[in-house]
Image (cartoon, helix red, strand yellow):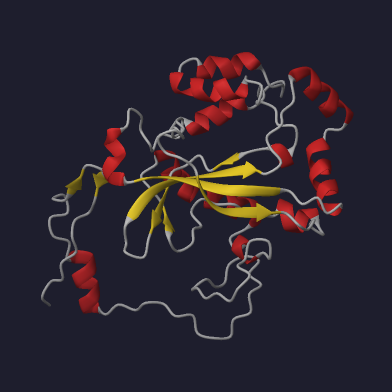
Amino acid sequence: MKFPDMVHALKPNPKSHIQENWRILDFFSHHPESLHMFSFLLDDIGVPQDYRHMEGSGVNTYTLINKAGKAYYVKFHWKPTCGVKSLLEDEAIKVGGSNHSHATQDLYDSIKAGNYPEWKLFIQIIDPADEDKFDFDPLDVTKTWPEDILPLMPVGRLVLNKNIDNFFAENEQLAFCPAIIVPGIYYSDDKLLQTRIFSYADTQRHRLGPNYLQLPANAPKCAHHNNHHEGFMNFMHRDEEVYSLSLSLSSCIRYFFGLNAILGSLSDKGLFLGQLLPLKV
């Protein structure tokens, strides 16, 4: 995995705690796939003017599954309705030097004034059957899908129409995780996504505790039911029995020892433990 090494290269010098360009470039010079990112970072769009004029990209490739069970690879894109605006280096020095919270203040003031920021949500889709027909790997996060052959399709919008009341409770305690999905959206074989699925949840448990999903900022707004209970800082009131699947001895034998040909089922996408076949007990 190169991603953790990349993060370490971007961190400050461990002795002086000063970020040094040579450390960053020394790492990326050995990874030519980073050139695409640097072409954006060092271009005129490298420093967004503020959050309202900033695009968003899902980076990872997910899967959309329709009612018929057909799956498509998907990329998500956010486009601001007020357009994309950026700062040149000398402008960024002036703006950031006079107010290091200028982007946050611009967002807060705009919402307070009723000038609600809005982003349009677009998707690109690929049939997995066509995955090998392109001259790039659609599951490679260092690549973007060409819009001339895979056009953006509008599917929704996001409007920020209310400022939060308490920054720590409603913002600082937010726990984003690529593993949390809704029906109709699933994962893909995107290697970076596969790692993020479990690593983000580990980070949130370390940062906020094992019951971080009970915090109001992270909990569902509708009624929900699960088997979670107990644990540090659990404040969910549950007076009913928490159901857990019980297995009889016969079931245990069938499902834990009834693996036929454990090493006999290999897939070009990875290794699987074989097909479970019940044993006669």
Judging depth in this view, the residue of 193 and 139 nearest the camera is 139
Left or right of 20, for residue 140: left
Q: Is residue 31 visible?
A: no
Q: In this view, does 225 lie above or below 210?
A: below
Q: Is residue 122 above or below residue 213?
A: above
**Which residue lies most toward the bottom here?**
240
Depth order, front residue of 131/189: 131
Q: Where is residue 265 in the image (x, y as percent from the top left)?
A: 16, 51
Q: What is the x, y in percent for residue 238?
A: 59, 81
Q: Is residue 22 above or below residue 265?
A: above
- Looking at the image, the residue that sits furthest to the left is 280
Comparing 234 with 24, the one in front is 24
Residue 22 place in picture, x, y as percent: 61, 13
- Farthest-out residue, right: 98
**Is 11 situated left or right of 259 in this image?**
right
Answer whether residue 230 is visible to the viewer in this image.
Answer: yes
Name the image quarter holding residue 11. Answer: top right
Q: Residue 10: x, y in percent? A: 61, 26
Q: Quadrant of residue 280?
A: bottom left
Depicted 229 relative to depicted 70: above or below: below
Residue depicted at x 46% and y 35%: 147
Quarter containing the C terminus: bottom left
* Residue at x 50%, y 85% (from the top left corner): 241
- Is 263 positioned to the left or the right of 161 in the image? left
Q: Which of 206 and 79 is in front in this view?
A: 79
Figure quadrant of the N terminus:
top left
Q: How many marks?
A: 0
Based on the displayed image, in which of its 4 quarters is residue 229 positioned? bottom right
